[in-house]
Amino acid sequence: MKKVIFISGLSLIFLASCSKDYTCECTVTDSSGSLATTTSSTTLTGKKKDVTTACEASNQTVGTLTYSCKIK
C-alpha cells in the first residue's frame, strides 16, 4: 500500500510539472511605413508544444500589417 501511495505521489508531481507559463511575444510591423512597429506579450500556460502552436497561429499578414508571434 505504501508503494502505491508513493508511486501515485510521484506521478502527480510529474504530471503537474508538465504545464508551465510561457510568454508569447507578438510584433506588428507595417510595410507601408505609416505605423510604428508595436510589440505585445501574452502569458500562456501549458506544454511547450501546445503553447508554441497556439502562439504561432497568430502569425498572419493583413494588408500592409504583418503579425509575427513567437515564444520567449
Image (spheres, rainbow, N blue to C red):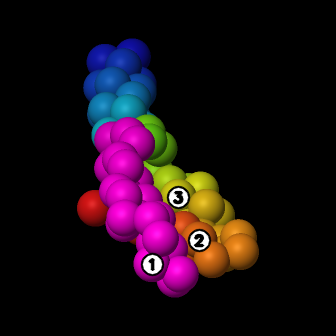
Amino acid type, label 3: Cys
Task: Name the side, left or right, on which 34 lies relative to 23.
Answer: right
Q: Of all residues shown, which one is farthest toward the front?
A: 34
Nearest the eye: 17 or 58: 58
Looking at the rendered structure, the secondary structure element under dot 3 is helix
> Which residue is identified by label 2?
65
**Residue 35 picture quarter:** bottom left
Above or below for 70 versus 13: below
**Which mark is first along the chain, 3 or 1?**
1
Q: Quadrant of the N terminus?
A: top left
Q: Of all residues shown, which one is farthest toward the bottom?
A: 31
> Which residue is identified by label 1?
33
Residue 45 belongs to magenta span = no
Percent coordinates x, y for residue 45 in the rendering: 43, 39
> Which residue is identified by label 3?
55
Looking at the rendered structure, the secondary structure element under dot 1 is loop
Percent coordinates x, y for residue 3 in the rendering: 33, 27
Extent of the magenta region: 20-43
Nearest the eye: 42 or 50: 42
